[in-house]
Image (cartoon, helix red, strand yellow):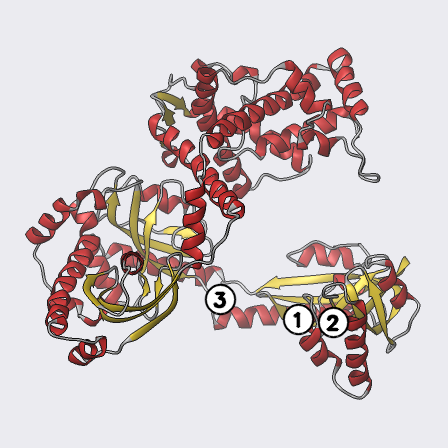
Amino acid sequence: MSILEKIRKRSGIAIIAIGGAIAMFVISDALNSNTRIFGNSNNTTVGSIAGEDIGVKAFEQKVSHNAELTRQQMGAEAQMDQNTMDMVREQTWSQLVNEGIMNGEYEELGIKITDEELMDMFAGENIHPQVKQSFTNPETGVFDKSLVISNIKQITEKGDEETKKRLHEFENYLVQDGMHKKYYSLIRKGVYATSLDAKSAFENRTQTIDADVVALSYFSVPDSSITADDAELKSYMNKNSKKYTEKENSRKIEFVIFNAVANHDDTIATQTWVADQLNQFGTSTNDTLYVNANSETPFDATAKPQSAYPTDVADALFSKPVGSIIGPVFADGKYSIYKVAGIKEDTIFHMRASHILFKTENGDTAATLKLANEVMAKIKGGVDFASMAAQYGTDGTAQKGGDLGWFSEGAMVKEFNDAVLNGKKGDMRIVKTQFGIHILKITEDKTKKLVCAGVLTKTLAPSENTTTTAYNAASQFVSEVTNIETFNQKVADNKLTKMTAEYVRENDKQVAGVQDAREVVRWAYNAKQGAVSEVFTVGEQFMVAVLNSIREKGKADFETAKPRVEADYKKEKKAENLLEKAKTAFSGASTLQAVADKLQLAVTPLTGQTFENNNIPYLGPDNIMVGTLFGTKTTGKLFGPIKGDNAVYIYSISKINPSAEQADMATYKTEVQSQLAQRVEYATFETLKEINKVEDNRYRFY
C-alpha cells in the first residue's frame, strides 16, 4: 500500500472516529479561522458556542469535507446514504463543540504537544495506536519504525500537495488527541480515593442486616381517592420548583399510524406473478437477461458453495442439474424462485459437520476426555446427537444440535479441519484442539461443487391502490381534527391506537421506535403546543401527530409539568394518610406482628440486606428505607413509621452482620478511584459545555 493510501485512510478513520469528547482537531487550514467557522454573514446558524455563532454554510462545508473523508475510507465506489450523512453531521458537530471548548482550555493551561512528542507518537517509544495499525505488517504482526520514518520523509520531500495536506491533518489529529489525554490526565489526577472511601465501598457491599418490615404501599391507595385543583398543584409545584426544572429541551408527541400493509388482493396479485414466472423462468434461454429484467435483485454470476444459499433451498440447488427450478420460497417478506444456472468445481473442499465442545476446566484434560468418551458411548448406543449437544455443548452451536453448517477447507483449526477432510459422512471421532475436546460428527461428504443460481425475487408489498387508501384515511383524519381534544375524540371514534413519544429531543431521528421520523421532530420544534400535524410519510406508513406539550430547558411550566406534579402530589398525600394509619397501629404495639395484625398486612423478612442493594422485596428500589435501616444501630426494637420512596414502613432489626476484617483495601480503593475518574471526565466536559453556553439549533435545518 502506498503512503498516500495509508495516510488518507488513517486520517479518514481518525477524523470520523472522534465523536464525543475523544479528540478534537481542525480539519483544514481554510477552516482554522474563527471568523470563517463562526461567521454569521447569512444570519442563519446551526448553533453557538460561548456566544460565537456557527453559520450553516460553514458548517455544511465542514460536513462535506468530513463526508468526503468518510467516502474515501469506505471505498471510492461507496454510496453515502442518509444514515451515513446523519452520522457525519453528528460527528462534525461534536468536533466543533470540542474545538470551541477545549482549545481555549489547552491554551489557558499551557497544554501543548512538542515536535519531540509528536515524533515519539510516530516512531518513538510511545507509538500512537493509529500509527501502529497503519504500519504493522499483517502477516508478521511486526511494527516497522523505519518504514514510518522513510515514508514521512518521502512525503515531506517529494509528496504532492494533497498528500502533504493529508499528513498534516493526521498530525493535527495526533496533536489534539495528545492534548486531550494530557488535559484529562490532569483532571483524573485531581481525583483521589482515600482509604475511608475504600472501606466505605467494602462495607456497603459486605455488611448485611437481617430485618423484618411491615410496608403500607402507596399503590394500596387508589389515585382516584385523592383530588386536587390547579391551585393546590401550583402551590405544591412552587414549593418544589427545582424538581420540575427541565434539564433539556424536549417535546411530548402523541400520534397515530396508518399502515399501508399488503392486503388480500395484493397477496393474490403477487402470488399470480410468481406462478407466471415459474414457467417463463424455467424456459428462458438467457438467465442473466431474464433476471435483470424481471427481478428486484440483479443476476449474480458468482458460483458459490452450499453455505452461501438458504438452507431450505441449498440441498435442492446442489442435487439438481442445470436448468432446474427450485421454489417459490417465501421468507423475509418476499418470494424467491431459484434456477440452477451453472455448476463449477472449486479449488478447495467444502464440508459439513456437527460437534459437541467440552471445555477443559482447571487444566484437567483427562477428566474432560473421560466425559467426552462417556457421551460418545451414549450416542453410539442410540442417544440422539443433537440432544447430547444441547446438554453438554459449551459453545453457540449447542442450541442448534451442534450443527456447524457448511464451511470451507481451512476455515477451522487444523486438527478439526483435518479430521473432517480425511473422513466421510457418518464418521464420528474425538478431536482435541486449542478450544477443548470435541465430539465430531461428519454430516455431509466433502465436495468441491459450486453452483451459480439465478434468483427471481418479488417483495410482498402494498400496491399503489393500497398505499393510496392508507394515505387517504390519514388525510381524512387530519381534515376532521383541529386540536388535542378533537384528535383524541377521532382516535376513539375510529378505534385507532394512539402512541406517545414522551421526551423527544431536537436532533432525534425516530419517535417512539418509529424510524425515519426526522421531519416529524422538526415539525414538533416549530409548532405551537396543541398543534395537529400534516400527514407525514415515515418509512412505509403514514403518521399524524399532535404536539401535546413543550418542555424548555431551565423552565418549569405548570401545564407541561402538571402530570408529574399531580403524581407527586398524590404520592405525598398517600404518604401522609398512611403515616397516620401506621402511627395508630404502632401505638401500644409490642411486636411487629401485632402491628401487622392491626393493619391486616404481612411481615416481610429482609435477609442479608446490603447498603449497595437498595431493593426491597415486592416493592422495588427504596433508597430512603435502606438508608434508614443502615442508620439504625439497635436490634430487637420497633421503629417507625418511616416515609420511604414506595411505602410507609414500620420495622425491626434482628441482626447486624458487620463486614469481615480486611486489612488490604487496595482492590476497593482502585475500584472507587476508577469510578470517580470515569465520572469526573464526563462531568467535566458537560460542565464546560454549560459554562460555554453550547446551543444546538441543528434541528432547524436537518
- Secondary element at image label 2: strand
Q: Which residue is mark 3?
A: 262
Going 64% across and 28% down the picture, which residue do you hit? 11
Is 541 placed above or below 379 here? Answer: above
Q: What crowding class fits label 1: few (fewer than 14 Cα within 10 Å), some (14-19), or many (20 or more)?
A: few
Image quarter in which the C terminus is found: top left
Q: In front: 83, or 625?
A: 625
- Secondary element at image label 3: loop
CA separation in Å, label 1 and label 3: 18 Å
- Residue 628 location (% of width, % of height): 27, 58
CA separation in Å, label 3 and label 2: 25 Å
- Residue 225 location (% of width, % of height): 12, 69
Image quarter in which the N terminus is found: top right
Residue 72 horizontal side relative to residue 438, left or right: left
Q: Which residue is mark 1?
A: 329
| Kind of residue at disc 3 | Ala
Image quadrant in which you'd find residue 73: top right
Q: Which residue is mark 2?
A: 326
Going 48% across and 19% down the picture, which residue do you hit? 106
Q: What crowding class fits label 3: few (fewer than 14 Cα within 10 Å), some (14-19), or many (20 or more)?
A: some
Q: What crowding class fits label 2: few (fewer than 14 Cα within 10 Å), some (14-19), or many (20 or more)?
A: many
| Kind of residue at disc 2 | Ile
Verify CB contact (< 8 Å) between mark 1 and mark 3.
no
Closer to the N terminus: mark 3 or mark 2?
Answer: 3
Q: In front: 625, or 537?
A: 625
- Secondary element at image label 1: strand
Residue 605 horizontal side relative to residue 648, left or right: right
Image quadrant in which you'd find residue 518: top left
Verify CB contact (< 8 Å) between mark 1 and mark 2.
yes
Closer to the N terminus: mark 1 or mark 3?
Answer: 3
Regarding residue 346, the answer to whether it shows in the image is no
